[in-house]
Image: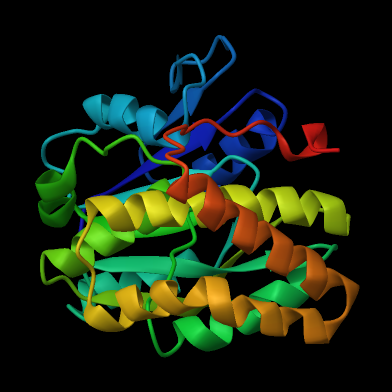
């Protein structure tokens, strides 16, 4: 299969490390960066949201590509071949990798999320996703949405595609370091997922889960202080959506107070 990487970078902070990693993987690639950089494989796009960066970056993907790989610039890839193998074997049309965070509240949250995702595809991880070009062509361009990864997931499911959560392939990245940051992060991701649901028709089990989420998320409080902030973020994200939030741009995590 012909593979092409589309890497998304808000700025150039992690760019040198990612470029070295991409060269070692030996696949063609393009980086859409929100900062001007003098490199033949890096193109500038003013930050307007990841959905917009993807739509712009797809203009640079060659026509003969079979698999497009979405990757965040700050997500270090491990065991990529394990994810690609699922596509090559015909076991999936979309694969998303496991996310390992170095520290902070999301280390615990992913234990809950991954346990659910092994059974129901309730959310993707845009840090590393592989999609067959034939399915991508059905959903491109992406609509304006904060949760572009779950939008892609739901659209693939809507079109009858098969989805795989590959835990042998994983990325290592940094995320929130405090409960307050985690609340803001959950608020944005949850609001974005409800945006995506309003534009897509995933299976009934996925839709039922999100119908119940605002009510059952209070159970997270039982896990302690982290759970309290998870609950607040999820609830406020849902409220933002109900109030008509249409934004699609994320501020950097370190700007969250």
Q: Position of residue 191 (x, y in %)?
A: 51, 51
Residue at 59% from the left image edge and 14% from the top image edge = 35
Q: Is residue 175 visible?
A: no
Q: Position of residue 184 (x, y in %)?
A: 72, 48
Q: Position of residue 149 (x, y in %)?
A: 41, 53
Q: Is residue 150 left or right of residue 141?
A: right
Q: Is residue 136 left or right of residue 55?
A: left
Using the rendered view, name the quadrant where residue 58 is placed. Answer: top left
Q: Is residue 129 visible?
A: yes
Q: Is residue 194 left or right of residue 257?
A: left
Q: How is the image coloured?
A: rainbow
Using the rendered view, name the quadrant where residue 30 is placed. Answer: top left
Q: Is residue 239 above or below residue 252?
A: below
Which of the two residues, 100 or 28, is positioned nearer the viewer here? 100
Residue at 53% from the left image edge and 46% from the top image edge = 240
Residue occupying the far front of the picture: 243
Using the rendered view, name the quadrant where residue 82 is placed. Answer: bottom left
Q: Which quadrant would the C terminus be assigned to in this image?
A: top right
Q: Position of residue 226 (x, y in %)?
A: 84, 70
């Amino acid at each position: 299969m012909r593979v092409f990487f589309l890497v998304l970078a808000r700025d150039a902070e992690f760019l040198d490390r990612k470029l070295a990693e991409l060269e070692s993987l030996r696949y063609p690639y393009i980086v859409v960066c929100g900062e001007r950089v003098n490199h033949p494989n890096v193109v500038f796009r003013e930050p307007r949201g990841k959905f917009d960066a993807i739509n712009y970056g797809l203009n640079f993907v060659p026509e003969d590509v079979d698999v497009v790989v979405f990757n965040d610039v700050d997500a270090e890839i491990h065991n990529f071949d394990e994810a690609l193998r699922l596509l090559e074997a015909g076991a999936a049309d979309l694969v998303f990798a496991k996310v390992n965070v170095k520290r902070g509240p999301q280390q615990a949250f992913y234990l809950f999320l991954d346990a659910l995702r092994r059974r129901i595809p309730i959310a993707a991880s845009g840090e590393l996703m592989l999609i067959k070009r034939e399915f991508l062509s059905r959903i491109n361009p992406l609509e304006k949405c904060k949760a572009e990864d779950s939008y892609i997931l739901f659209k693939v499911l809507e079109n009858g595609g098969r989805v795989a959560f590959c835990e042998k392939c994983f990325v290592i990245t940094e995320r929130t370091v405090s409960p307050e940051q985690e609340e803001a992060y959950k608020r944005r991701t949850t609001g974005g997922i409800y945006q995506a649901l309003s534009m897509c028709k995933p299976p009934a089990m996925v839709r039922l889960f999100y119908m119940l989420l605002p009510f059952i998320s209070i159970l997270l409080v039982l896990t302690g202080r982290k759970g309290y902030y998870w609950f607040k973020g999820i609830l406020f994200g849902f409220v933002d959506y109900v109030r008509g939030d249409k934004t699609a741009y994320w501020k950097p995590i370190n700007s969250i107070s």
